[in-house]
Amino acid sequence: MPRTLRELFVEQLRLCKVTAGQQVGVIAEMGQKNEYVEAAVAAARDLGASALVLTASSLSNPMLPPYEPDGREVPALLAAAAECDMVVDVTVGGLIHSDVRTRITGNGKRMLFVAEPADVLERLMGDEALRDQVEAGGRKLNAGSTLHVTSAAGTDITADISGDSLPITHQWGYVDDEHRWDHWPSGFVACFPHDRTAEGTIVLQPGDALIPWQRYVRDEVRITIEKGFIKGVEGPGADAHLLRDYFEAWGDEDVYAISHMGWGLLPAARWSAFDVYDPRSLYGQELRSTAGNFMWSTGPNRFADRETPAHLDIPMRGCTVRIDGETVVEDGRLV
C-alpha cells in the first residue's frame, strides 16, 4: 500500500536525524505545494521536533527573462532559518543555485529540497548503500586530473578536475550532517571542473533530456565548447534553434558557461519518467539520477562567482565517462 506524504516525510526526516527538541524550518511560496508544507510540519511534530513555516510571496526564478532579483524577503527569511536545526525547501523552483542556500548551509544548517510527486519520493528513497556508491564516485573524482566523456554519436569532451580543492556534489537524497544540502530524491555525483577548462564537442541524441524544459531531445544537436563556454549549437532540427534562442534571450555571456558534470547512480530511477508522468508535475530529478547517465549543466556556478538564473541540466544516454583513463561509465552503463 502506498504511504501517505506525511509517512514519507517521517521516514525522510528520520534519515536526516531529526530528533525531539529540534526545530525544523519549512521554506515555501504563498499558495504553492501546501500539501508538502503540511506533511513536513506534521512529520516534524511526529518526531517530537517543532516546525516553523517561512512563507515568501515568491522565490522562484523566471524560466525566461526579464529577470530582476527580488531580495526584499530574504534577510528576514535567513534570520528565521538561522534559528532552525534543519531547513526543508518546498519552493517551486528550489533555492539550489542561490545565495539563500549558500548562506543557510554555510551557517552550519542542513537543508533538503523536495519537489517530486509522492510516489516518486517513495520509490526513490535514499539509503546507506546509495550513499556509499555516491561517496565512492566522489573519491574517484577527487583523485583524478582529467574527466573525459565520449559517445558513439560523437561526443568527445575533456575537463580539468585536478587538485584536492575540486568542488564535488554528492547527492544521495537526505541530509544528516551539518552544512549539507541535498535533494530528495537523488542519486548522483558531479563536480565543477576548473573554470574555462572544458574543451570539445557534445552531441545530443533523440531521447536525451532537457531540464527544466522537462522533455526529451527530438533532434541531434552538436554543441561546440571552447575554454569552458558554448561557442556553437548546430543541428538539422528544431532543438538546435530552440537552444540558441534560449541562450540568446538572456543577453548574458554567463548562460553559455559549462557548470558541473557527473553521472547517475540510482538503480531504481527510470529514464521513461517524462512520458510516464505528466512532466509538469516533475522536477526532473529522476533523469538526473538514472544509473549510468552522463549529466552536464550550463550557467550558474557559485565556485566561479556566476549566479545567472539561466540554467539547463542535460542528462545523456549512451556515454562513456573516464577519469584519467579509468572507465566509470561505459556506453551508458555503470562499471
Image (cartoon, rainbow, N blue to C red):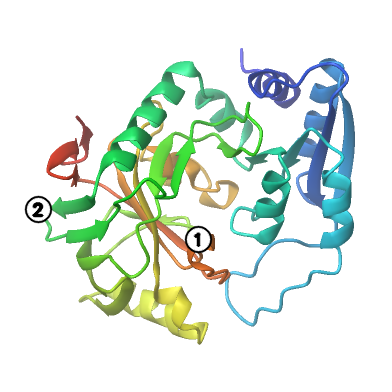
The answer, for residue 125, to whether it is visible in the render is yes
280 or 188: nearer the viewer = 188
Residue at (52%, 24%) from the top-left corner? 126
Of label 1 and label 2, which has the lower sequence position?
Answer: 2
Q: Which mark is residue 325?
A: none
Residue at (25%, 59%) from the top-left corner? 159
CB-based contact (under 8 Å), mark 1 and mark 2: no
The N terminus sits in image quarter: top right
Please rate how many residues cluster around mark 1, counting C-alpha atoms within 10 Å: few if below 14, some from 14 to 19, many from 20.
some
Asked if residue 151 lies left or right of residue 2, the reply is left
Asked if residue 183 lies left or right of residue 289, the reply is right
Tag in front: 1 or 2:
1
330 or 260: nearer the viewer = 260
Q: Position of residue 153 (x, y in %)?
A: 12, 57
- The three-letter code of the residue at mark 1 reads Phe
Q: Which mark is residue 303?
A: 1
Q: Write down the residue under mark 2.
A: 152
Q: Position of residue 61 (x, y in %)?
A: 65, 66
Residue at (22%, 68%) from the top-left corner? 199
Residue at (79%, 32%) from the top-left corner? 85
Q: Secondary structure at mark 1?
A: helix
Q: Position of residue 101 (x, y in %)?
A: 67, 52
Please identify the residue farthest to the bottom as the structure is shown.
Answer: 251
Quadrant of residue 66 within the rendered picture: bottom right
